[in-house]
C-alpha cells in the first residue's frame, strides 16, 4: 500500500495542481527495499510515465510488452503513482491514464462486468466511501452512477492469470512510498 505521513498527505492535498503532479516532476521517491532495508531511489517522472508510453495494443513504444515480474512491478508502481501523486482527490484521469487503468487494471477485476456496468464514462481518484481518507479509483458510469474498485484485486488477479508468483505480487502491492522530497511541499 502507498502511504504518506498524515502531515505530508494533508500538505499534498492542499498544493496547487502544478505542484500536485509529482509524477512529472524531478521529485525523488524512495522505495522500501524490503527485508534488507536497502532503498532503490527512483525518479517519480519515470515511475509514472508508463501511461504516456502505452499504445493500447500490447506494446510500449517500439518494444513488445512481455508480462514478467519487472513489467508487473513497473505497472503496479505506475498505478500507485497515478492514484497517490498525479491527481488530487476528486479529479478525473486524463485519457492516457484512464485508458491504462481500464485496459490493464480494471478488466482484471474478479467482478469487472459488475463494476463496469453499463459502461465507463470516466475514472477519477476519490476517497473510499467506507474507509475514511483512503484513496481509490472511482468509475463514473455512462448512466451517471458511481462505483469504486480495488486496483489491488485487479493486480492480484492479473498476476494469477499471467503466472506471476502471488506472494511476490502481494508484497509488491504493499510497498510504501517514503521520503517524499520536502522541496515539493507548499509553504505553510
Image (cartoon, rainbow, N blue to C red):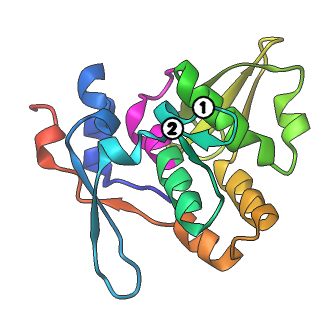
Res 117 label: none
Above or below, 108 against 161 in this view is: above
Task: Describe residue 71's horizontal placement relative to residue 186 as left or right.
Answer: right
Q: Closer to the camera, 179 or 74? A: 74
Question: Which span is picked out in magenta?
Answer: 80-92
Residue 184 rendering spot, x and y as whole percentages: 17, 39
Q: The C terminus is located in which quarter?
A: top left
Q: Residue at label 2?
A: 61
Above or below, 132 against 19 in this view is: below
Residue 24 covered by magenta stretch: no
What residue is drawn where x is 66% and y is 59%?
67
**Residue 10 in view:** yes
Q: Residue at label 1?
A: 55
Mark 2, secondary structure of its residue: loop
Task: Describe residue 73's horizontal placement relative to residue 31 as left or right.
Answer: right
Residue 109 rendering spot, x and y as whole percentages: 79, 48
Task: Describe residue 22's horizontal placement relative to residue 169 as left or right.
Answer: left
From mark 2 to mark 1, how far is it between C-alphas?
7 Å
Above or below, 156 against 58 in this view is: below
Pointer 2 and pointer 1: residues touching (CB < 8 Å)?
Answer: yes
Crowd band around label 1 with a 10 angstrom C-alpha radius: few (<14), some (14–19), many (20+): some
Mark 1, secondary structure of its residue: loop
Amino acid at each position: 500500500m502507498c502511504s504518506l505521513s498524515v502531515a505530508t498527505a494533508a500538505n499534498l492535498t492542499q498544493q496547487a495542481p502544478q505542484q500536485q503532479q509529482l509524477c512529472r516532476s524531478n521529485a525523488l521517491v524512495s522505495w522500501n527495499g524490503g527485508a534488507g532495508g536497502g532503498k532503490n531511489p527512483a525518479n517519480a517522472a519515470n515511475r509514472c510515465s508508463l501511461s504516456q508510453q502505452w499504445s493500447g495494443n500490447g506494446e510500449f513504444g517500439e518494444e513488445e510488452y512481455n508480462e514478467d515480474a519487472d513489467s508487473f512491478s513497473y505497472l503496479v508502481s505506475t498505478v500507485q503513482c497515478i492514484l497517490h501523486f498525479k491527481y488530487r482527490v476528486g479529479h478525473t484521469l486524463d485519457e492516457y491514464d484512464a485508458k491504462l487503468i481500464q485496459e490493464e487494471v480494471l478488466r482484471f477485476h474478479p467482478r469487472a462486468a459488475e463494476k463496469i456496468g453499463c459502461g465507463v464514462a470516466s475514472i477519477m481518484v476519490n476517497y473510499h466511501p467506507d474507509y475514511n481518507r483512503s484513496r481509490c479509483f472511482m468509475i463514473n458510469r455512462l448512466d451517471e452512477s458511481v462505483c469504486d474498485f480495488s486496483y489491488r484485486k485487479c493486480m492480484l488477479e492479473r498476476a494469477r492469470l499471467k503466472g506471476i508468483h502471488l506472494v511476490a505480487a502481494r508484497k509488491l502491492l504493499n510497498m510504501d512510498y517514503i521520503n517524499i522530497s520536502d522541496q515539493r511541499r507548499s509553504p505553510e
